[in-house]
Amino acid sequence: MRVRDKPRQARQIWSRHLRLLVLSLTTLIAISLLSRLPAWSLLELRSFDYLSTVDDPRPPPGGPVIVAIDEPSLADINAQWPWPRSLHAQLVTQLRDAGARVIGLDIILAEPSTAENDNAITNAVGPDVVLAGDETLIETPQATQLIRVTPLQQLTEAGAKTGIASVDLSGDGTFRRIPAYEDGFAATLAKASGTISATLPAGQLIQSFGPARSYPTVSYYQALDPAHLLPPDYFKGRVVLVGLSLQNAPVIDKGGVDAFATPYTVHTGTLTSGVEIQATIYDNIRRGLSIEEAWLPVVAACILVSVLLAAATVWRSTGWLTIVTSAAALLAFVAISFAGIRLAHIFVSPLGPTVAYISVVFGQAAFDYAEERRNKRQIIRAFAQYISPDLVRRLSQDPSQLKLGGERRTLSVLFSDVRGFTTIAETLKDDPEQLTGLINRLLTPLSDVVMDHGGTIDKYMGDCIMAFWNAPLDDPDHALHAVKASLAMQAAISSLNQELEREAAMRGGRPHVLKMGVGINTGECIVGNMGSTRRFDYSCLGDSVNLASRLEGASKNYGVALLLGEETARLVAGIYTVVELDRIIVKGRTVPSPVYTVVHDADAEALAAHRAFLEAKYTGTLAPSDPAFDRLAADIPGLAPYYVIVREALVESGEE
């Protein structure tokens, strides 16, 4: 036997390795195709957002100072925006006198204003001032236009430099890259301050330095009088940027004036002002902190290594160790990507290696799981010929249950039986196929209802079904689910009767009308594997089970389709309207047991009248002529047959 097993085992191993090879190659091809999609690129950039900001880097020392046109300045200056250019001229003069090395005005001064104001700003600017320009690409069906807006010519003739303040946004509207302008605003500032020492890293990823208002910022009105409102030498030797910057960073979904989403927006949900973004670009250029994206061959090599590592992880098998190894590998991908950003200023996205690793590992795990399930199904099919398939499934998961015995649990037990089915069977005795078909059409929907409501079908006894809730799986609402199932079973019987009526009408015959009685009781039972050492099944027994069976049989004596035991009624009373019908002594018991049913559309007054009716019945003061019979039958139509039965019983007993 062992000799025959070795070739079979070798074939299984070879088949598994072949699937793993195909899965690995498929993963490589799929990721190569996915990486060409714009959405993939945006996901990689979003991973960059998190990694480049996870350690919350702060602005480098000696960086720009921002003069903010903010709410306090608007309130203090008390002038309508845009402010007169003479005020900007005064600011430039004050900043220059305070020792500012370079002054950048992130304000577009492209259109003439008054001669007095234009002359004032012209006289104030010089080679140490950079004025903002703008460049916009307008695409129409007819043509594509590149519109560049620059400051007034008289300002540039006075020595002021021009820097394009436009920024490039990614497909998700987030600012991440150094603008591709040789004469960009921040680049021009760097040249004017004499700090630029390399070619402009246009298109490289930007390193952000905190959320909005992370740079040293003062209000515009303070910079107009730095000697009195700011610390001494605050601007001395510094690059100063002037522009709109709201005191409170605007929320991303509301937008803002000259404000943009940055990598920090994923953490804060707020936007960063344009002037602070220019300061960030300036520091990236000045300190050489921009981040280059890894070349395609490097990314491809990382993905290939990830696939090989994943294949090695699952080469022999998959299990709990696979999960631990996978978690460690994914953390390593993220750590390596973060180290590349911080140590080498190179971004290798962890997305490709992560997706490749997960695809191979979890793909192979899915194959292994499917193979295991297939083997279990083969076992179930083989042994289900001898014992219950449900028990086989449980035993395949926990073989230790392969023993006789049980446990004590509180169950809600349901018995259902079709009334008068013996008569129907007698009618169809010469047509066994039709009788068998009718039983199957009856039991199938009823069984579906039980299982849809979480019940366990214990057994079929002809047209009778026995089911229970709260075993083998715990069900805190077992009584409620049992009652809901019984009501759904009545609805299923009604639907089946309609079908039988239509079929009988087509045949020109009389339909077989099915009516069902249900008894439900909740109590302590013994549940487990019952039977002999050679043949056993999962079932329950106990006094509560017997009472449920008695309730089903007694339901027809009260003219109702559903009869509940006392504990069941108590557990569902908060959901359904339950009413007591009688106190009976069932076979095998000496203590009277209250029995209940569920009613619908009964108001509080009718229920109170019913309780009074019952009290009179119990005390023997109820007479057949009592008007309560007719009144209650009208107020609670669902109990009308019950009141008729009670009245007839009183008449037969000779009560007046």
Image: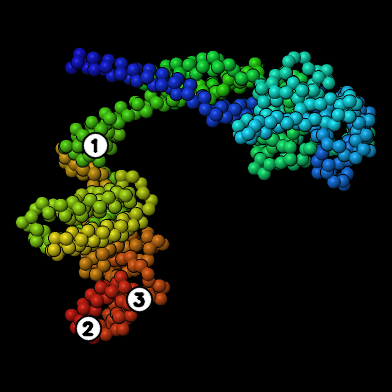
Q: Is residue 105 left or right of 294 when viewed as pictured?
A: right
Q: In the rendered structure, which amino acid carries the disc numbered 1? A: Val
Q: Estimate how packed mark 1 is, as few (under 14), some (14 to 19) or many (20 or more) residues with alpha carbons within 10 Å.
A: many
Which of the two residues, 50 or 413, is positioned nearer the viewer here? 50
For numbered disc 3, what is the local secondary structure?
A: helix
Q: Is residue 207 left or right of 447 when viewed as pictured?
A: right
Q: What's the residue at 88%, 29% (across, down)?
A: 155
Disc number lying in front (2 or 1): 1
Disc number lying in front (1 or 3): 3
Q: Earlier in the sequence, mark 1 or mark 3?
A: 1
Q: Earlier in the sequence, mark 2 or mark 3?
A: 3
Q: Is residue 215 visible?
A: no
Q: Position of residue 248 (x, y in %)?
A: 74, 41
Q: From the viewer's perspective, is residue 449 above or below residue 108?
A: below
Q: In the rendered structure, which amino acid carries the disc numbered 3? A: Asp
Q: Estimate how packed mark 3 is, as few (under 14), some (14 to 19) or many (20 or more) residues with alpha carbons within 10 Å.
A: some
For numbered disc 1, what is the local secondary structure?
A: helix
Which of the two residues, 576 or 183, is positioned nearer the viewer here? 183
Numbered label attached to residue 392: 1
Q: What's the residue at 19%, 15% (across, down)?
A: 4
- Mark 1 and 3 residues: CB-CB less than 8 Å, in contact? no
- In which image quadrant can residue 254 be found? top right
Location of the N terminus by quadrant is top left
Q: From the viewer's perspective, is residue 562 above or below residue 256?
A: below
Q: Label 2 belongs to which residue? A: 655
What is the CA distance from the residue labelled 2 to the residue labelled 1?
59 Å
Q: Label 3 belongs to which residue? A: 635
Disc number lying in front (2 or 3): 3
Q: Position of residue 131 (x, y in %)?
A: 83, 29
Which of the two residues, 35 or 556, is positioned nearer the viewer here? 35
